[in-house]
Amino acid sequence: MANLLLRPSWYLPESAITPRAEYQRRREFLRQLGLSGAGLLAATLTGCGKETTPAAALVPATAGAATAAAAAAATGLYPAKRNPEFDPKVALSNSDEVYTYNNFYEFSTTKSRVHKLVGKFTTDPWSIHIGGLCENEMTLSAAELIGLFPLEERVYRFRCVEAWAMTVPWTGFPLAKLIEKARPKSEAKFVKFTTAMRPDQMPGIATLGEYPWPYTEGLRMDEARHPLTLLATGLYGEPLKKQNGAPLRIVVPWKYGYKSIKSLVRIDFVAQQPATLWETLNPVEYPFESNVDPGKPHPRWSQASERVLGNGESVRTLKYNGYADAVAKLY
Ligand code: MTE
């Protein structure tokens, strides 16, 4: 793992960082408070950069932010110490954008509405089952799972298949640690992930009634064990907000964003490649592997560039989202 991300191709000098400075001011503030501790044909991810976030939409998701941050800090878990190996000194995406521009189809296909529709979704208490082909099957509360391993913060690039991108500080631990604890059997070749399915709390499920809910995703065992694959519990130094996949999600930074499944209730070790929601709906547009690849256009748009969330700038997309040195050997 040493030097895994040392000066990647997207490294920027510290002088280029405005939003990050803003974020650090917030951490400083906390420290000063003494708290440092529609049918298959419609099966398409929408957006592709056409939607903009109205300014008014920024208010609800960020209101009470200081209170939430203070409560998070009081747990002693947040903000977690940033791992210097994953601190590339690049500009972070503005957190307000990241909280209000979301893909979470269980709630809505309109990105700016997701955060307004998560109110009824209860993420505490929360239970997650780790099972399938493993020696150490477990059912744990989210709090128990979060307490299993030390949390760390990592700044990762994140690239949606719809050609928008962000750079954010996730909190979590390598999924590999949990896999090791579960002791998968030798027949286990893939890991299957499942999101909660609660139609009474998730209004988007009824709207997309013919989708193969619950949302499922999967990784090959070597991808799931890769040191970059994170079980994320937080974002911007606080526990995950509901719209970003509270209380537990997966983050796989070299793959398109739909592989980074939210609000996990099951992790299963399986022998065969699992069916995933998006691949079941449209295997040509959303195949299982889905590594970020600027040279391989989506059937309906180019993947050569991406729109940076927040400033709208168009930048070149990087193979494996900039993580080629770490992951190209897997393929
Ligand atoms: N997980 C679930 N359960 N449901 C979803 O609709 N959308 C995916 C992924 N995980 C999705 C999901 C897609 S397409 C993207 S780009 C990312 O979540 C968006 O994560 P964010 O809203 O935190 O930016």
Image: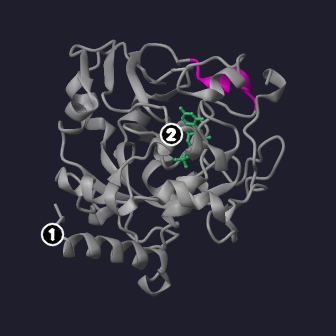
Is 53 drawn above or below residue 262 in the view shown? Answer: below
Res 289 → quadrant:
top right
The local secondary structure at tag 1 comes to loop
For the point 23% across and 34% down, which residue is it?
A: 143
Would you say residue 151 sits in the magenta stretch?
Answer: no
Q: Nearer the viewer, mark 2 or mark 1?
A: 1
Q: Position of residue 172 (x, y in %)?
A: 31, 47
Residue 57 position within the rendered picture, expressed as x and y whole percent measured from the top left:
63, 57
Q: Nearer the viewer, residue 217 or 318?
A: 217
| Residue 276: percent from left, percent from top | 59, 23
Q: What residue does disc 1 label?
A: 34
Residue drawn at point x = 33 percent, y = 23 percent? 128
Instruction: Classify mark 1: residues with Cα within 10 Å, few (<14), some (14-19) or many (20+).
Output: few
* Nearer-the-camera pick, 221 or 35: 35
Give left or right: position of 272 versus 234. right
The residue that disc 2 covers is 260
Would residue 79 be seen by someone viewing this image from the given angle? no
Q: Nearer the viewer, residue 147 or 176?
A: 147
Identify the magenta region. Answer: 275-284
Q: Is residue 287 left or right of residue 194?
A: right
From the viewer's perspective, is residue 50 above or below residue 211? below
Picture layout, residue 138 above or below residue 26: above
* Ligand 1 within 8 Å of the CB at mark 2: yes
- Residue 60, numbered circle: none
Ligand 1 quarter of the rendering: top right
Where residue 122 sits, quadrant-wise, is top left
Amino acid carrying label 1: it is Gly
Q: Which residue appears at 46% of the width and 67% of the height?
A: 8
Q: Is residue 273 visible?
A: yes
